[in-house]
Image (cartoon, helix red, strand yellow):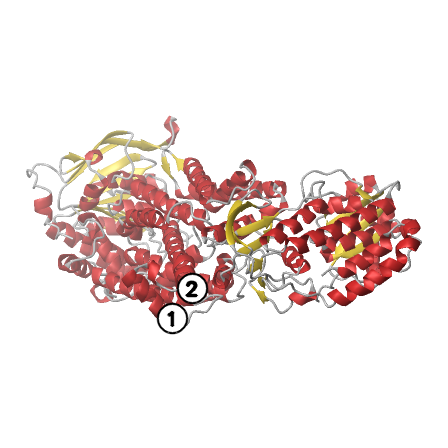
C-alpha cells in the first residue's frame, strides 16, 4: 500500500468540500416552502453581487436569514462532532467511543436545566448555560481520570462513563421538578435541535471550532502511533502525556461547542469517522479533516431531511440522525465483522 | 521531513574506550518493602557491536530490565548511560531516535499497510504531520530488507502470519536507525528456520551497523550460539554475566532453572544445551 | 357569530324570569338565527386607516403591530378557535395541526405542529400578526419569530375571565372591537347565568384528570380550575404548580366525588369506567365504584370561548337538580368542531 502523502489529503479534502458545497446549496432550496433552482440561483447570485437588500423578500427571509445560517450551523456541528468522535476514539483506543461517552452532553443538559429552573420565568434555553455545564463536566472528568498526575486511559473512560450516568440520573430527577411547559422545549433540545438561538454569533463559533480542530490536527501523526498502544508510542518518540491532554481538551471543547448550540445530536460523532475509515483508511492525518467535512455533509443532509420529511412540521435533527444512523451502524458493524 | 543524518552525525562518535551501553548499579522495585525488589542492583557494559542475551526463568526481571534500558521506567538507584550520556537526561524524542524496542505483543486497532507501519519508525526523526519524503521511504524499504521482509512492502498488516508480522515489527525498529536495539522474546512466534534467520540478522546488524543488541530470550541455545554476552537473572539477582561459554554451565543453569540440563562443549567452541529427561 | 350561544343562554335563565321573557326570547332567537346562520366571517373593514401601535401581550412582551391586522397566523388551536369565534376567518391565513374547531377551519393552510411549526412557511405568508398560546407553543419558537421581525401575541390565560380579556384584546388587534365586545358580553352573560343557577349550592369535590398515567391534574392557577369552580366544582386535592403530578394515594385519601376526563370523543363512558375499575388503586375510588365519571370534550382543554358551553354542560352534569326544570339542552352548540 502506498504511503499517505499530503497530496492525497488535499485531494480527499477537496472532494468532500465540493460535496459539502453541493449539499449546502441543495439544502438551501429545500424546505416547507420550496424554492425552485432557478429562483435559488438568482437569489444567491443577487445576494453575492449586490448584498442582501436587493433580493426578493422570500429570498431574503427564507434563504438568507433562515436557511443559510441553519445550513452553516449544521455544517459546523457536524464537523465538530465528527472530529471530536475521531479524537476520542484514538484517546480511549476504543472504536465505540463517541463524543458523549465522557459525559459532556449530560453536563450540558444539566447546565441547561439548571438555568431553566433557576432563571426568571421566560428564560430561553440558551447555549451559555449548557456550555458552562459541559466545561464543568470536562474539568471534573479530567480530575477523576488522573492517575499519578496524568490522564490514564482506563481510569478516564471509567470516570467519564460513571459521570455521564450520574448526571443523567440527576437530569431525570430534575425533569420531574420542571413545570410541564418547560419540558417540551427541553425535550426538543435534548434530541438535537438546530433552531435554538445561538449564544455566540456564528462567526465566532466557527473561529473557535476551527482553532480547536487545528490544535487537534497537530497531533495527528502522534495519534496514529498512540492507537498501537501507549508503550509503543512512547518508544517511537511520542510525548504521550502531552498528546493525550491536547486530544482530551480539543475533543471535549469541540463537543461542548456543538452540544451547547444544538443539543445532543447523536450518531454523527460515532459513525462518520468509521465511514471515513472504510472509504479512505485510518490514518489520522487524513481521517481528521475528512471526518470534519464528512460530518458537515452528514448533518446538513440530516437537517434537510428534518425540514422536509414531515413538512411543514420541523422534526428535530437528532431524530433524523438516529433514524439514518442506527441502520447504518448495523451495516457498518456487519461489514466490519466480515 | 528532513532526512535523518546518519547515526554518526547525530550522535558524535564517542572515544573508543566508552562502551555503547553502560549500566551502573541499577535496581528497581514496585513497592517500598525490600521483598518487592524486582531487580537487585546490577551493573554491566555492552560494546557497540555486541549482542547481549538476557536469560532467566519467568519473573526473573528480564522484561523490567528491558523497560529500564528503554527508558520507560526509571531505576530506583543507579545510572544507565548510552554513549556516555545518562538516559534520564534524554527527552522522549531523542530517546526514540537512539533506542528501538521490539515487544512481544503488537496489537493493531485499525488496519494498516505494512509500509505505513514501518514508516512509523521514522516518527522520532520527523516533525509535524510527518508526511514521508524520499529519504524516509528509502530507509523504510531498507529496513524491511534488513529484516527479511522486503517482499511484504505492499501487504496489509492484518494479512500477515505471525512470523511475517514479527519481521515487519523488527523492520519498524530498524527504520528508527537506533544505536541500541532491545527485543523482548522475539523468537516466540517463529518457527526454527525463522528463529535462526532472525538471530543471524541481529548478529549481522550488530557487526556491520555497530548497533548494540539486547534481547531477552527463553532459548538458551540461540543465546549460546549468537550472543557475545549473556546475563542470567534469577529472581532479580545477577546469577551470571559474561561470554556464553563461561556463564552457561550445568551447575548455574540447573540452579537457576531448576530442571536437569546437560551442557556439551563442541570442538569449534560452541555450546549445546540439552534437556536431560529421565526415561525411567 | 355566536347566536347559538344566545340560544343556550336563554335556557339558562332562572325559571321565574322565563315566562316573561319567553316570548321575547323566542322572537329574538328566530331573528338572530336568520341573521347569523350559518356562521359568517366578518369582512375586514378596509376603510379603517391602519396604524402602527405598540401593545403588550399577555406575557408582558411588547410588540409593534399594524392595527387593524389583516393577515394573522393562529399558532395554537385555541387561538384559531377564538379568532373564528370573533368572525375573523378571512384574516386567518394559516393555522396549525390539531386545530379542528370550528369545522370551518378545515380548509385553512397548516404550518405544522404547534410545538414545531415551519418558520419558513410562516415567514413566506407575511403575516401581520401571529397569535400563540403559552400553553401550546415553545418559547424558542416565539423567540425565533421575534428575531424574524414577525409580531407575536402570546395569550396566557389563567382564568375564565382571562379568556374574555383575550377575546377583547384580539378584537382590538383585528379591528373588530364591536364583535369582540358582543362576544365578550355574551360570554359573561352565560357565566352569570350559570353562577345564578348554582348559587348557594355546595360545590362538588372533583379531580380533573389531564393524564392518567402518569397522573396529572390541573393546578390552582390554571383556567381549567377556574372553569371547574364556575361549574360548581372544587379540586379535591390541594396541589401546587400548574400541571402537577399526583400520586394515586393522594387521590384515594381525598376521595373526590367525581372524576373529570377530557376526551377527544365523548365516547363510551362505560368503556372508561370499566377500564378504571380494572386498574388497581383506581378501583379504590368511590367515584369509580359509584360511576362518578364525567367526560367533557377536548375543548375543555382550550382557553377559547367554546369553553363556556363546556362549563355549562359540566355544571349540568354535576348539579342536575339545578337544571331539573330545563328540558334537554338543544343539540345546538357553537359551531361544532370538525373531526
Q: Which of marks 1 and 2 is nearer the N terminus?
A: 1
Neighbours of disc 1 within 10 Å: few (<14), some (14-19), many (20+): some
Residue A295 lies left or right of residue A125; in this view the side is left
Output the chain of dot 2: A
Q: What is the x, y in percent for residue A221?
A: 26, 52
Q: Are marks 1 and 2 in contact (CB under 8 Å)?
A: yes
Q: Mark 2 points at which residue?
A: A58
Q: What is the x, y in percent for residue C124?
A: 48, 63
A86 lies above or below B9: below
Residue drawn at (65%, 55%) of the image: C78
Q: Does the rendering let one see residue C257?
A: no
Count of numbered labels shown in the rendering: 2
At mark 1, the secondary structure is helix
Spatial separation of the CA atoms under disc 1 and disc 2? 10 Å
Q: Which mark is residue A39?
A: 1
Residue C250 lies left or right of residue A160; in this view the side is right
Residue reaching furthest to the top: B33
Residue drawn at (23%, 52%) of the image: B129
Q: What is the x, y in percent for residue C55?
A: 54, 46
Neighbours of disc 2 within 10 Å: few (<14), some (14-19), many (20+): some
Amino acid at each position: 500500500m502506498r504511503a499517505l502523502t499530503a497530496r492525497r489529503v488535499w485531494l480527499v479534502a477537496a472532494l468532500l468540500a465540493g460535496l459539502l458545497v453541493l449539499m449546502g446549496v441543495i439544502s438551501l432550496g429545500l424546505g416547507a416552502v420550496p424554492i425552485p433552482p432557478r429562483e435559488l440561483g438568482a437569489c444567491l447570485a443577487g445576494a453575492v453581487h449586490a448584498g442582501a437588500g436587493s433580493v426578493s423578500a422570500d429570498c431574503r427571509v427564507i434563504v438568507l436569514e433562515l436557511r443559510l445560517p441553519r445550513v452553516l450551523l449544521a455544517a459546523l456541528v457536524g464537523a465538530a462532532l465528527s472530529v471530536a468522535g475521531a479524537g476520542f476514539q484514538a484517546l480511549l483506543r476504543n472504536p465505540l467511543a463517541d463524543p458523549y461517552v465522557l459525559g459532556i452532553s449530560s453536563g450540558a443538559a444539566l447546565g441547561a436545566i439548571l438555568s431553566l429552573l433557576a432563571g426568571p420565568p421566560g428564560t430561553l434555553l440558551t447555549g451559555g448555560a449548557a456550555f458552562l455545564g459541559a466545561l464543568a463536566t470536562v474539568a471534573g472528568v479530567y480530575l477523576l481520570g488522573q492517575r499519578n498526575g496524568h490522564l490514564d486511559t482506563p481510569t478516564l473512560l471509567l470516570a467519564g462513563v460513571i459521570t455521564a450516568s450520574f448526571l443523567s440520573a440527576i437530569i431525570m430527577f430534575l425533569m420531574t421538578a420542571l413545570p410541564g411547559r418547560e419540558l417540551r422545549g427541553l425535550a426538543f433540545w435534548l434530541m438535537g435541535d438546530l433552531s435554538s438561538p445561538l449564544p455566540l454569533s456564528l462567526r465566532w463559533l466557527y473561529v473557535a471550532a476551527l482553532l480547536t480542530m487545528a490544535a487537534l490536527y497537530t497531533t495527528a501523526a502522534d495519534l496514529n502511533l498512540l492507537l498501537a498502544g501507549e508503550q509503543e508510542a512512547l518508544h517511537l518518540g511520542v510525548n504521550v502525556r502531552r498528546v493525550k491532554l491536547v486530544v482530551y481538551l480539543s475533543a471535549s471543547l469541540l463537543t461542548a461547542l456543538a452540544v451547547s448550540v444544538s443539543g445532543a445530536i447523536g450518531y454523527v460523532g460515532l459513525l462518520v469517522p468509521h465511514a471515513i475509515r472504510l472509504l479512505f483508511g485510518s490514518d489520522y492525518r487524513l481521517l481528521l479533516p475528512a471526518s470534519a467535512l464528512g460530518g458537515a455533509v452528514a448533518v446538513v443532509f440530516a437537517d434537510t431531511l428534518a425540514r422536509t420529511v414531515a413538512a411543514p412540521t420541523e422534526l428535530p435533527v437528532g431524530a433524523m440522525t438516529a433514524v439514518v444512523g442506527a441502520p447504518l451502524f448495523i451495516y457498518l458493524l456487519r461489514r466490519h465483522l466480515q | 521531513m528532513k532526512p535523518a543524518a546518519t547515526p554518526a552525525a547525530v550522535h558524535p562518535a564517542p572515544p573508543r574506550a566508552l562502551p555503547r551501553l553502560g549500566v551502573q548499579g541499577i535496581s528497581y522495585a514496585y513497592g517500598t518493602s525490600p521483598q518487592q525488589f524486582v531487580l537487585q542492583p546490577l551493573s554491566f557494559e555492552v560494546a557497540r557491536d555486541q549482542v547481549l542475551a538476557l536469560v532467566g526463568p519467568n519473573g526473573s526481571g528480564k522484561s523490567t530490565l528491558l523497560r529500564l534500558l528503554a527508558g520507560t521506567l526509571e531505576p530506583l538507584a543507579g545510572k544507565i548511560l548510552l554513549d556516555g550520556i545518562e538516559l534520564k537526561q534524554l527527552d522522549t524524542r531523542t530517546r526514540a531516535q537512539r533506542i528501538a524496542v521490539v515487544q512481544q505483543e503488537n496489537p493493531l486497532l485499525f488496519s494498516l499497510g505494512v509500509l505505513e507501519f514501518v514508516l512509523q519508525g521514522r516518527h522520532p526523526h520527523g516533525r509535524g504531520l510527518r508526511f514521508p519524503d524520499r529519504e524516509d521511504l528509502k530507509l523504510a524499504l531498507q529496513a524491511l530488507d534488513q529484516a527479511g521482509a522486503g517482499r511484504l512492502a505492499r501487504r496489509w498488516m492484518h494479512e500477515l502470519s505471525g512470523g511475517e508480522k514479527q519481521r515487519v515489527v523488527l523492520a519498524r525498529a530498524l527504520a528508527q536507525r537506533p544505536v541500541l536495539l532491545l527485543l523482548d522474546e522475539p523468537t516466540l512466534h517463529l518457527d526454527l528456520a525463522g528463529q535462526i534467520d532472525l538471530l543471524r540478522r541481529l548478529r549481522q546488524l550488530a557487526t556491520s551497523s555497530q548497533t548494540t543488541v539486547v534481547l531477552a530470550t527463553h532459548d538458551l541455545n540461540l543465546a549460546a550460539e549468537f550472543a557475545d554476552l549473556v546475563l542470567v537473572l534469577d529472581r532479580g539477582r545477577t546469577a551470571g554475566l559474561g561470554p556464553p561459554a563461561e556463564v552457561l554451565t550445568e551447575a548455574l543453569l540447573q540452579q537457576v532453572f531448576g530442571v536437569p540440563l546437560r551442557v556439551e562443549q563442541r570442538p569449534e567452541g560452541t555450546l549445546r544445551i540439552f534437556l536431560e529427561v529421565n526415561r525411567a | 357569530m355566536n347566536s347559538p350561544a344566545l340560544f343556550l343562554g336563554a335556557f339558562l335563565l332562572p325559571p321565574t324570569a322565563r315566562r316573561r321573557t319567553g316570548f321575547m326570547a323566542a322572537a329574538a332567537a328566530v331573528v338572530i338565527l336568520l341573521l347569523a346562520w350559518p356562521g359568517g366571517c366578518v369582512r375586514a373593514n378596509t376603510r379603517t386607516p391602519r396604524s402602527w401601535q405598540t401593545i403588550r401581550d399577555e406575557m408582558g412582551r411588547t410588540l409593534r403591530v399594524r392595527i387593524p391586522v389583516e393577515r394573522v397566523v393562529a399558532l395554537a388551536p385555541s387561538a384559531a378557535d377564538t379568532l373564528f369565534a370573533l368572525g375573523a376567518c378571512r384574516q386567518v391565513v394559516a393555522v396549525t395541526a390539531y386545530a379542528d374547531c370550528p369545522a370551518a377551519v378545515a380548509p385553512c393552510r397548516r404550518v405544522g405542529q404547534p410545538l414545531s411549526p415551519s418558520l419558513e412557511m410562516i415567514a413566506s405568508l407575511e403575516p401581520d400578526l401571529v397569535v400563540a398560546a403559552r400553553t401550546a407553543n415553545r418559547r424558542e419558537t416565539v423567540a425565533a419569530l421575534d428575531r424574524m421581525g414577525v409580531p407575536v401575541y402570546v395569550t396566557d390565560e389563567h382564568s375564565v375571565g382571562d379568556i374574555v380579556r383575550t377575546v377583547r384584546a384580539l378584537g382590538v388587534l383585528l379591528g373588530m372591537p364591536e364583535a369582540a365586545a358582543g362576544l365578550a358580553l355574551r360570554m359573561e352573560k352565560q357565566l352569570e347565568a350559570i353562577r345564578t343557577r348554582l348559587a348557594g349550592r355546595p360545590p362538588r369535590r372533583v379531580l380533573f384528570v389531564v393524564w392518567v398515567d402518569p397522573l396529572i391534574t390541573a393546578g390552582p392557577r390554571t383556567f381549567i380550575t377556574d372553569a371547574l369552580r364556575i361549574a360548581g366544582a372544587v379540586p379535591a386535592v390541594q396541589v401546587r404548580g400548574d400541571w402537577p403530578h399526583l400520586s394515586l394515594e393522594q387521590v384515594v385519601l381525598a376521595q373526590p366525588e367525581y372524576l373529570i376526563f377530557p376526551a377527544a370523543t365523548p365516547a363510551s363512558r362505560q368503556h372508561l369506567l370499566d377500564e378504571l375499575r380494572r386498574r388497581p388503586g383506581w378501583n379504590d375510588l368511590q367515584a369509580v365504584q359509584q360511576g362518578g365519571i364525567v367526560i367533557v370534550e377536548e375543548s375543555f382543554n382550550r382557553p377559547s370561548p367554546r369553553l363556556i358551553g363546556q362549563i355549562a354542560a359540566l355544571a349540568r352534569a354535576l348539579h342536575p337538580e339545578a337544571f331539573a326544570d330545563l328540558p334537554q339542552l338543544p343539540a345546538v352548540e357553537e359551531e361544532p368542531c370538525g373531526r
